[in-house]
């Protein structure tokens, strides 16, 4: 019949219309409507008894309150949802969970730019280093972090050199010591300083000290208190030899599906402000560590500025190697290093001016 559609065309148009409708319904279902409650699952490796877990809980409650109850966040610690701590980044990236809080260092080699903050003596107290880490990630980490939505990146602050034979306050004190190391970069730093680095998992530190497998260990106060490393050592030197970085990451699709008003709530609880807050809270949570050491009669020490400058100078080959490694990856190593140091100096100046 003239002007009549062929049955195949009718089927094709009908199928296209049905497909478009189905796609539209799927997208509608995927994106919560304005005013609808959204439940997000958040996963981390730290147990509920840890101070860092309690800080994450504070953040979830703040977000829930500011969303007027439209956002509900279920926080799971101790890897309750399965996997290993090293899997947390992939869980957030792949949508296994909506949000993860983790150490980027668990994914060895995946975040080379951010490793600049693990260089020896580049860091600062957590309240200063944390906003510097977050600002650096925003500027240099777009490619590294492109598969996830970064809520905040921050620092665990200063590490501590826990030792048994004698205090470590001079360069010569490192000679002949076997010291537990938390990372490849800190291993290189300890070698440059004259010690023998021994890689040992965090939970095994105290046992290694008690059995004299190592003479000392690099570990933050909070962890050292929890696993009784403070008890096993005799001297404690606060230093910026090693500072791990941390990050709270959100699945990109989980963030994209949020209505505009709920995106604003997440955004308002992200970035520089949150990095400073987490840094300050981390320092506060560390205070029971030196208090415990002093109660045991253990000296809590600081390295004199002139001596620390010697340590930094001796560690220069670690910096040179880092720049060389970045350049080999096609990255501007020296420029990134200079920027990291500039950011630390900027936030230190702001903190001093308060």
Image (tube, grey):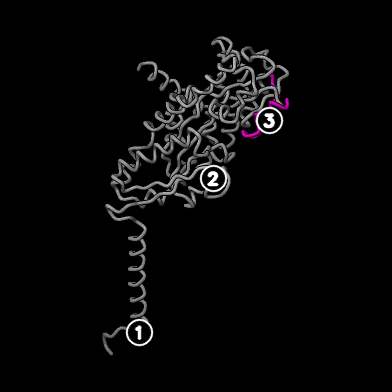
For the point 36% across and 31% down, which residue is it? 273
**Marks 3 and 1 close (CB-CB < 8 Å):** no
Q: Which residue range is magenta in the image?
A: 194-213
Q: Quadrant of the C terminus?
A: top left
Q: Is residue 346 within the magenta segment?
A: no
- Observer-side mark, 3 or 1, equals 3
Residue that appears at 38% across and 48% down = 255
| Circle 3 residue | 207
Tell which of 199 and 211 is nearer to you.
211
Tell me the SS state at disc 2: loop
Task: Check disc 2: other Cα within 10 Å, few if <14, some if 14-19, many if 20+.
Answer: some
Q: Residue 9's x, y, as percent?
A: 35, 80
Say which residue appears at 57% left-offset and 19% top-offset.
293
Q: Position of residue 193 (x, y in %)?
A: 66, 19
Circle 1 residues within 10 Å: few <14, some 14–19, many ≥20: few
Q: Earlier in the sequence, mark 1 or mark 2?
A: 1
Residue placed farthest to the bottom in the image?
1
Q: Quadrant of residue 167?
A: top right
Q: Which residue is mark 1?
A: 7
Residue 196 location (% of width, % of height): 71, 24
Left of 41 or right of it: where is 121?
Answer: right
Bin the neighbour count of mark 3 within 10 Å (Cα to Cα): few under 14, some 14-19, many 20 and up: some
The answer to whether residue 106 shows anywhere in this view is yes
Cβ atoms under marks 1 and 2 closer than 8 Å: no
Of residues 48 and 122, which is closer to you in this image?
48
Look at mark 2 in the image and give the residue it sits on: 79
State which quarter of the image contains the N terminus: bottom left
Q: Earlier in the sequence, mark 3 or mark 1?
A: 1
Left or right of residue 238: residue 347: left
């Amino acid at each position: 019949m003239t002007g009549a559609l062929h049955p195949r065309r009718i089927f094709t148009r009908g199928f296209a219309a049905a497909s478009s409708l189905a796609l539209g319904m799927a997208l509608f279902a995927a994106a919560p409507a304005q005013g609808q409650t959204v439940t997000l699952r958040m996963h981390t490796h730290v147990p509920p008894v840890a101070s860092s877990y309690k800080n994450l809980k504070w953040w979830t409650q703040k977000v829930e309150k500011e969303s007027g109850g439209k956002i509900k966040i279920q926080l799971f610690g101790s890897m309750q949802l399965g996997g290993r701590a090293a899997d947390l980044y992939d869980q957030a990236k792949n949508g296994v969970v909506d949000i993860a809080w983790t150490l980027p260092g668990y994914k060895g080699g995946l975040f080379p730019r951010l490793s600049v903050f693990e260089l020896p003596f580049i860091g600062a107290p957590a309240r200063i280093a944390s906003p510097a880490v977050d600002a650096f990630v925003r500027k240099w980490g777009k490619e590294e972090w492109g598969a996830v939505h970064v809520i905040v990146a921050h620092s665990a602050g200063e590490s501590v050199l826990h030792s048994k034979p004698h205090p470590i306050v001079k360069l010569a004190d490192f000679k002949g010591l076997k010291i537990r190391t938390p990372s490849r970069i800190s291993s290189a730093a300890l070698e440059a300083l004259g010690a023998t680095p021994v890689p040992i998992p965090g939970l095994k530190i105290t046992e290694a000290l008690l059995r004299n497998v190592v003479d000392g260990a690099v570990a933050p106060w909070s962890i050292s208190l929890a696993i009784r490393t403070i008890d096993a050592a005799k001297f404690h030197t606060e230093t910026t030899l090693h500072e791990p970085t941390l990050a709270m990451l959100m699945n990109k699709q989980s963030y994209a599906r949020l209505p505009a008003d709920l995106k604003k709530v997440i955004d308002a609880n992200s970035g520089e402000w949150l990095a400073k807050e987490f840094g300050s809270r981390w320092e506060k949570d560390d205070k029971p560590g030196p208090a415990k050491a002093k109660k045991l009669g253990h000296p809590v020490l600081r390295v004199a500025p002139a001596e620390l400058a010697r340590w930094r100078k001796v560690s220069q080959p670690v910096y040179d190697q880092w720049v060389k490694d970045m350049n080999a990856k096609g990255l501007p190593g020296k420029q990134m290093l200079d920027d990291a140091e500039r950011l630390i100096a900027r936030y230190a100046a702001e903190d001093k001016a308060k």
